[in-house]
């Protein structure tokens, strides 16, 4: 897990979608989604001692101050990606079929209500995009759960027992780009007791 995310004392999740909006002269409005939804995170760190400051700097060096991408889960303590559904499986869940935003998932425990709930995060093994479940979903007697995603698939997923598997909840990892290398402020102290603060880190989901 990312050190920046793990040491955060505040994480803001933002879900963005490009939309066309128009209002006629007579006041009628029209809105239409023009692309998929993507996630952004604003991460704020507490005042840190030298040890924690160095650990953040080391990760920034690994990221080449934003040139390289960051792949990370979100700390469970934030409950941002925490699973709400029962999610009882009967083996490794895989994609049975898909059509548009509707996905069928097999190898789930049969006849369980709320296997996945609206807002649960999900990711498919063949891609980097993270999605959310749009409405509560139960499993049928054959152990298949049909879910609707909050946005259309970015890339083709492979169906069948040798195709895409899924990851859900806190196990989901986001591929992120650092939008800025925030400034660090140093609060002088006695020898080896300086304190350090960063401005906000802003990350955006990328593919």
Image (cartoon, rainbow, N blue to C red):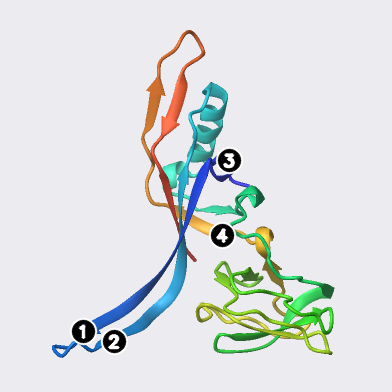
Distance from the alpha carbon under mark 1 to that under mark 4: 36 Å
Task: Check residue 174 in the rendering and tell me which mark sits there, or answer none.
Answer: 4
As helix, strand or loop, the secondary structure at mark 1 comes to strand
Distance from the alpha carbon under mark 4 to that under mark 2: 32 Å
Query: Does residue 159 sit above or below 132 in this rendering?
Result: below
Q: Residues within 10 Å of mark 4 (few under 14, many from 20)?
A: many
- Seen as rendered, the residue at the extreme left is 25
Q: Residues within 10 Å of mark 1 (few under 14, many from 20)?
A: few
Task: Check residue 23 in the rendering and tell me which mark sits there, or answer none.
Answer: 1
**187 sits to left or right of 113:** left
Mark before the other along the chain sequence, 1 or 2:
1
Task: Check residue 30 in the rendering and tell me which mark sits there, or answer none.
Answer: 2
Q: Residues within 10 Å of mark 2 (few under 14, many from 20)?
A: few
Q: Which residue is mark 3?
A: 3
Residue under the image location 46 percent in, 67 percent down = 38
Task: Check residue 57 in the rendering and tell me which mark sits there, or answer none.
Answer: none
Residue 22 picture location, percent across and down: 23, 83
Q: Do the CB atoms of the residues marked 1 and 2 lie less than 8 Å apart?
A: yes
Query: Taking the image as drawn, is residue 205 in sight?
Result: no
As helix, strand or loop, the secondary structure at mark 3 comes to helix
Distance from the alpha carbon under mark 3 to that under mark 1: 45 Å
Mark before the other along the chain sequence, 4 or 2:
2
Query: Taking the image as drawn, is residue 63 in sight?
Result: yes
As helix, strand or loop, the secondary structure at mark 4 comes to strand
Residue under the image location 43 percent in, 30 percent down = 197
Nearer the observer, disc 1 or disc 4?
Answer: 1
Residue 202 picture location, percent across and down: 41, 50
Q: In which quadrant of the rendered view does residue 166 lie? A: bottom right
Query: Does residue 138 sit above or below 171 in this rendering?
Result: below
């Amino acid at each position: 897990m990312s050190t920046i995310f793990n040491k955060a004392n505040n994480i803001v999740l933002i879900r963005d979608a490009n939309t066309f909006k128009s209002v006629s002269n007579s006041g009628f409005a029209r809105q239409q989604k023009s692309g998929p939804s993507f996630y952004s995170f604003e991460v704020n760190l507490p005042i840190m001692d030298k040890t924690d400051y160095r650990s953040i700097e080391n990760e920034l060096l690994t990221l080449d101050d934003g040139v390289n991408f960051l792949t990370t889960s979100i700390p469970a303590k934030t409950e941002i990606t925490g699973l709400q559904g029962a999610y009882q499986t009967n083996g490794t869940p895989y994609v049975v079929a898909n059509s548009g935003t509707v996905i069928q998932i097999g190898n789930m425990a049969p006849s369980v209500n709320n296997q996945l709930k609206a807002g649960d995060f999900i990711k498919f093994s063949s891609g980097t995009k993270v999605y959310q479940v749009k409405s509560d979903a139960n499993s049928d007697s054959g152990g298949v759960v049909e879910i609707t995603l909050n946005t259309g698939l970015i890339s083709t997923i492979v169906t069948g027992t040798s195709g895409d598997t899924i990851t859900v909840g806190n196990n989901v990892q986001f591929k992120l780009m650092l939008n800025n290398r925030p400034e660090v402020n140093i609060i002088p102290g006695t020898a080896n007791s300086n304190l350090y603060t960063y401005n906000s880190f802003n990350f955006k989901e990328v593919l």
